[in-house]
Amino acid sequence: MSRSVVLFGYHEVGARGLEALLAQGMDVRLVVTHEDDPDEEIWFSSVAELARRNHIPVITPDDPNTPEVIGQLRHMRPDWLFSFYYRRMLGSKLLSLPRQGALNLHGSLLPKYRGRVPVNWAVLNGEQETGATLHRMVEKPDAGAILDQQAVPILPNDTAFQVFRKVVCAAEMVLARTLPKLLDGSWRETSQDLSAGSYYGGRRPEDGRIDWSQEAWRIHNLVRAVAPPYPPAFFDHDGHRIHLLGSYWRDEPAAGSGPRLYWEEGRLYADCVDGKRFEITALDLDGRVLDETGFEDIFGSEAVLTV
């Protein structure tokens, strides 16, 4: 029975994935993870802490593809290598070490949204579903054969963080179904049709800048795709940096010509150029969250925006 494992993991999916491996009785011989970045908001579980709680050795190399790391893994003689939200590319020498192969959990329904931050991209593009996929690792990222995947819905007002939580649960479901098949040798694989999806790159905080020439639905999608704990959507107005920390969509007509921000019956709205509006659930100006009084003290009855 093939059960010895080396895990490359980080973030919430890494921690939940490690729990799933342990629950299925996999022999996790080594965990490779990252040191936390002091400049990053750490809101997710620690893979290293969980591994140490279970007396599993942990290493945190800057580069996992060095001869030293490869030699250490070769000594472990793993049947399987798993990658659960690990942030470095694994080279061919690492991928060739496990006897049964290397498998990755990806946060989309492959072949759609291959590459970086797939959940944020799916929300940004207004998708109605995404999911988690367990696939075989090859040198080309997110291109190997699929073992299993689980879809989850994206509702019109879900933030990327909320969708990510769903994807974590989907990943656990995939592992719960697939790990027993890996143990008894009954798993099946399906090749990907890469032409049916696209590859997406990483996102930077600057990519959250709002373009008020866009339609309301697109701006709402940007706001919810990068809502906290991610660096939020923003724009500059009258010398101020304004962050939209949340939004809500009801497919309503604008109350006037846009783009503009204004309060109506105790709610803050953005009228947009397409004649639609969305509600802004929280607005931060220069690091201070504004209520209606604070908004009107600065902008008066409305803030007229430039396109």
Image: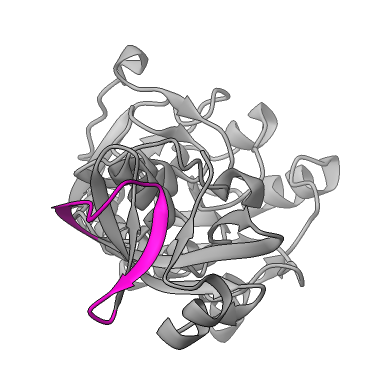
Visual colour scheme: one colour
Report if residue 29 is visible in the image: no
Magenta span of residues: 249-266
Going by the image, does 233 lie left or right of 33? left
| Rendered image quadrant of residue 46 | bottom right
| Relative vertical location of residue 137 with respect to residue 290 in this rendering, above or below | above
* x then y, percent, for residue 188: 22, 32
* x then y, percent, for residue 154: 21, 52
Q: Report if residue 169 lies within the magenta region.
A: no
Nearer to me, 205 or 238? 238
Nearer to me, 68 or 251? 251
* x then y, percent, for residue 67: 83, 40
Nearer to me, 32 or 85? 85
Going by the image, does 165 lie left or right of 70? left
* x then y, percent, for residue 241: 65, 62
Question: What residue sits 45% from the left and 87% below the top?
Answer: 293
Going by the image, does 272 lie left or right of 27? left
Question: What residue sits 38% from the left and 44% below the top?
Answer: 124
Going by the image, does 94 lie left or right of 165? right
Quick one: which residue is furthest to the front in this view? 300
Question: What residue sits 51% from the left and 84% below the top?
Answer: 294
Q: Report if residue 265 lies within the magenta region.
A: yes
Question: What residue sits 54% from the left and 82% below the top?
Answer: 297
| Rendered image quadrant of residue 195 | top left
Nearer to me, 4 or 162? 162
| Relative vertical location of residue 144 with respect to residue 72 in this rendering, above or below | above
Number of numbered tags placed on the structure image: 0
Report if residue 35 is visible in the image: yes
Quick one: which residue is furthest to the top in this view? 195
